[in-house]
Amino acid sequence: MRADILCQLIAKQIPAEHFQIRGLEVVFTDPEESNKPFYAPNESPYNTAENRKIVKSVIDNYDSLAEAFLIEHPEYKEV
Amino acid sequence: MNPIDNRFSLVGDIFNIKPVINAAVNKLDLFAKSSGVAPTTDHPIGVNIPDGNGVTFRIRNASYLSGTSQFILNDANAYWGAVSGADNYKIHIYEIYDANGGIVHALSRYSGFYNVPTTTTVDDDDYFLLENGSSYTRAATDFCICVGWFWANYNTANTPDWTILNTANLKPGLKYDPPSNYGYDKLMAVSIVSASDIPATSVVNVVVKQSRWYNIWGKVNGRCGISPTTLLGYIKTGSATYGSATQQDSAEWDTAGNGMQNNVPLFAHVFLTAGETIHLGAYVSGAGSDRIVYAGNTRLKFKAAN
């Protein structure tokens, strides 16, 4: 699973600024992250049941979605 | 003048201490040089220990708080964040003067501590490993002084995992209060990939454990799929909150090339108080596709500047 492709696939359904891929994990962004200690827990308002369901669906169907994405975006084959 | 006073009348900062590698290669004994065994009344050890008002010469002539004068580097303990493999670690020997007037032996990864860190987490960078058997309770108000070092290798493929080295140039040594060697490299743990601009974020952070001047180097590595791309790096210090920390350096790279990956280098020289945080910050913007900060090449390095 490629993080860049996964990111683009999720961004089709969730606003791109509402999440990031950090390593192997999809992390919903916390707008206050820089305004609290680095060790404070993530309290993203975008970490909703609906968004988690979207992420799970994309990951579960990654292979077929990625295949279609690469046909649509051949430039990603070169990365 | 009693015999003890007479014995110490001509000594320096460290007296009669001899680190000896045990037959078991993960153990180091701290013996009296004159006897070749743990200190006794006839063969005491001594050290000048600061107490906030200069230094006072302290002696130990018996076991204290059940300490055996022996250090044991136990299996499956990555003390001080040691990474299993070929790297050798310089480990420092400390003498602690506790509130009840006794000397406790301890180890730490770094020189330059003068008060006892209280952490009991073995992989913390300021962890003090006490002599085996000691019932001493770490107290930040207790004073200590570094008196020597030895080198050791941590490799979980070996038995035991820790091997104290005794090669020609890596033998145990004694030196009173050597300059601090505190500081290390810290890599960004995982890459960040985003389909929108990555706002300025603390991507690597360290809480320093010694109050002193530091040299700080940073490198942020990133890219964006569609230009124009801006990659920014920051060194900020002070608050644990990135947005409140004080900016010490910044660097910027701009490109019109799609998908180009580059580094921005950073440097700062700053005094930090123990407990303050160093942040490496990163920001990536672009016109489209993925913005990425790469873990493999994004790192923070800090070193005591003494």
Image: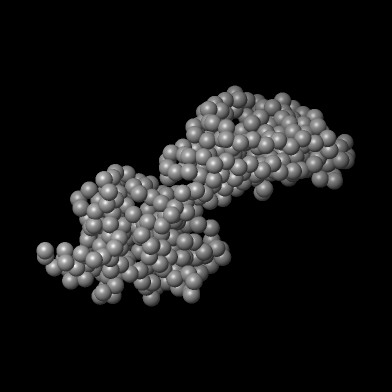
Q: In which quarter of the image is residue B228?
A: top right
Tally of numbered discs = 0
Determine the residue positioned at 18% across, 71% down: B42
Q: Nearer the viewer, residue B92 or B49?
A: B49
Task: Identify whether B23 is placed above or below B113.
Answer: below
Q: Quadrant of residue A46?
A: top right
Q: In the rendering, at what x and y percent does residue B187 appear? A: 60, 47
Q: Quadrant of residue B111?
A: bottom left
The quarter of the picture where the N terminus of chain B appears is bottom left
Q: In the rendering, at what x and y percent does residue B218 appear? A: 61, 44
Q: Nearer the viewer, residue B63 or B54?
A: B54
Task: Identify whether B83 is placed above or below B258.
Answer: below
Q: Is residue A6 left or right of residue B120?
A: right
Determine the residue positioned at 28% across, 57% down: B48
> Would residue B150 be seen by someone viewing this image from the given angle?
yes
Task: Identify whether B65 is placed above or below B26.
Answer: above
Question: What's the colour scheme?
Answer: one colour
Q: Is residue B105 left or right of residue B290?
A: left
> Would residue A21 be seen by someone viewing this image from the given angle?
no
Q: In the rendering, at what x and y percent does residue B233 appear? A: 65, 37
Q: Residue furthest left?
A: B1
Determine the residue positioned at 48% across, 75% down: B168
Determine the residue positioned at 27% across, 52% down: B55
Q: Which of A24 and B18 is in front in this view?
A: B18
Q: In the rendering, at what x and y percent does residue A23 appear? A: 65, 43
Q: Which residue lies furthest to the front in this view?
A: B10
